[in-house]
Image: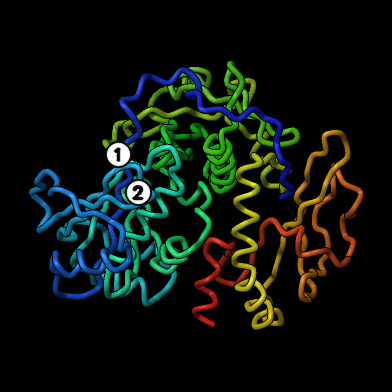
């Protein structure tokens, strides 16, 4: 994908005609305790204290019938107190663990785990940073090493290795880490694609109704891009139109409005389930139909707008973990793995804009990257699609590794080095 730094206004106003909130819900995340015996409160307190020498233990939180023990902490960098507790695993599905984790060791340890350490806090005005600190507390609390985490707010099970990568990074994670995208079969051959976890930002959840099953994977990419735009502060026009990139537009409406435009009823979404209750907005095209034109763009490698703050964050993380990329390139480049970098180029105009283009890497040298340009530049003359050339490392803004087991970015690729 190409990414352009966007001129879309960034703001903190609510999206659409959302009802008044009492405030964003808390972020609730559980870590799987890998040992057969449950940890003592003292053991976990000591581990958290060692990881955060400047934290303060606060009065015990309100009682929870399911908790064996609980305590609260005030952690530097978190705007609100964080609660830590221990509970029995209960009915958390073994099938969900099996389906969510690729690593066989993580699957085995999480699958047999009988105990969960829970954490809960309100993330505040910098949710990505708050989420990262919450992960650091959870990582420290699982003294024996966390095989996986259940993000209750996003209804997603996450790899323990990836959680540790997030926790130990100097750069906060991308917005996509803070929410999950889910697909639910509904009436006939249709699917309902929707998010969980955006409420932690004080934003509505995003959904698409009326799609055929064959387009659900493209819908994941579209929903991710819309959520990323909203989290980054790029909002729609007053009538709900949101521009995601060159020629890519969607309209955000209430789910009820989307169903009315489709001439359909509630059978196209499963809003009756308790875990789907909450404010949400649906994506349609400018004619009020499912956003197939936008989905077609995503299937063809779209040119996306990116807010400056998110582009800067991506670039910091890509450079922070570029050593991982280089090591994996040296180890696996001849094994069929594909290595891509995204480089930033200044476009034409005054003031100048910036264009981010993807390259497939052919060779690396200190401070330099040789690659073939995969995109057709729209705004710069410093690269041409299909051209193989050397470029300065200073242009680096992101990278990606394609392996037989899936795709990895700076957020997650450290697990590949651990396995090498």
In the rendered view, tell whether residue 29 sits above or below residue 50. Answer: above
In the foreground, 126 or 195: 126
Specify whether 58 is left or right of 366: left
Residue labelled with disc 1? 275
Q: Residue at horizontal 31%, vertical 75%?
A: 108
Give the x, y percent position of residue 384: 90, 54
> Along the polypeptide, which appears first: circle 1 or circle 2?
2
Specify whether 218 is left or right of 365: left
Where disc 1 sits, the SS reads helix
**Other-residue count near label 1 (Cα within 10 Å), few / some / many at <14 / 14–19 / ≥20:** few
**Other-residue count near label 2 (Cα within 10 Å), few / some / many at <14 / 14–19 / ≥20:** some
The picture quadrant where one finds residue 38 is bottom left
Residue labelled with disc 2? 155
Specify whether 236 is left or right of 373: left
In the rendered view, tell whether residue 261 sits above or below residue 87. Answer: above
Label 1 close to label 2 by CB (< 8 Å): yes
Give the x, y percent position of residue 231: 52, 38
């Amino acid at each position: 994908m190409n990414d352009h730094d966007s001129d879309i206004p960034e703001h903190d106003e609510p999206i659409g005609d959302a009802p008044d909130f009492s405030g964003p819900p808390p972020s609730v995340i559980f870590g799987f305790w890998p040992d057969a015996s449950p940890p003592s409160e003292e053991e976990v307190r000591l581990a958290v204290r060692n990881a955060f020498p400047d934290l303060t233990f606060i009065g015990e939180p309100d009682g929870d019938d399911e908790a064996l023990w609980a305590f609260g902490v005030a952690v530097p960098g978190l705007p609100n107190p964080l609660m830590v507790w221990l509970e029995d695993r209960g009915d958390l599905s073994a099938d969900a663990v099996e389906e969510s984790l690729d690593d066989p060791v993580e699957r085995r340890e999480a699958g047999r785990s009988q105990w969960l350490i829970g954490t809960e806090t309100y993330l505040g005005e910098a949710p990505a940073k708050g989420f990262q600190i919450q992960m650091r507390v959870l990582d420290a609390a699982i003294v024996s090493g966390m095989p996986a985490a259940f993000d209750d707010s996003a209804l997603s099970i996450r790899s323990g290795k990836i959680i540790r990568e997030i926790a130990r990074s100097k750069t906060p994670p991308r917005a996509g880490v803070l929410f999950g995208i889910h697909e639910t079969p509904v009436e006939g051959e249709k699917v309902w694609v929707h998010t969980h976890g955006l409420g932690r930002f004080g934003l509505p959840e995003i959904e698409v109704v009326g799609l055929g099953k064959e387009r659900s994977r493209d819908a994941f990419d579209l929903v991710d891009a819309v959520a990323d735009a909203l989290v980054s502060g790029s909002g729609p026009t007053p009538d709900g139109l949101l521009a995601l990139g060159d020629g890519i537009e969607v309209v955000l409406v209430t789910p009820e409005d989307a169903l009315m435009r489709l001439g359909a009823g509630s059978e196209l979404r499963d809003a009756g389930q308790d875990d789907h209750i909450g404010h949400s907005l649906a994506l349609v095209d400018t004619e009020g139909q499912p956003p197939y034109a936008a989905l077609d763009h995503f299937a063809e490698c779209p040119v996306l707008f990116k807010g400056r703050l998110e582009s800067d964050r991506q670039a910091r993380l890509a450079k922070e973990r570029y050593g991982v990329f280089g090591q994996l390139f040296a180890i696996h480049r001849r094994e069929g793995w594909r290595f891509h970098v995204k480089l930033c180029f200044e476009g034409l105009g005054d003031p100048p804009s910036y264009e981010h283009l993807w390259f497939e890497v052919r060779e690396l040298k200190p401070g330099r990257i040789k690659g073939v340009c995969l995109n057709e530049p729209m705004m710069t003359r410093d690269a041409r699609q299909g051209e193989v050339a050397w470029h300065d490392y200073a242009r680096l803004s992101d990278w990606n590794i394609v392996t037989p087991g899936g795709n990895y970015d700076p957020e997650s690729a450290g697990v590949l080095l651990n396995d090498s």
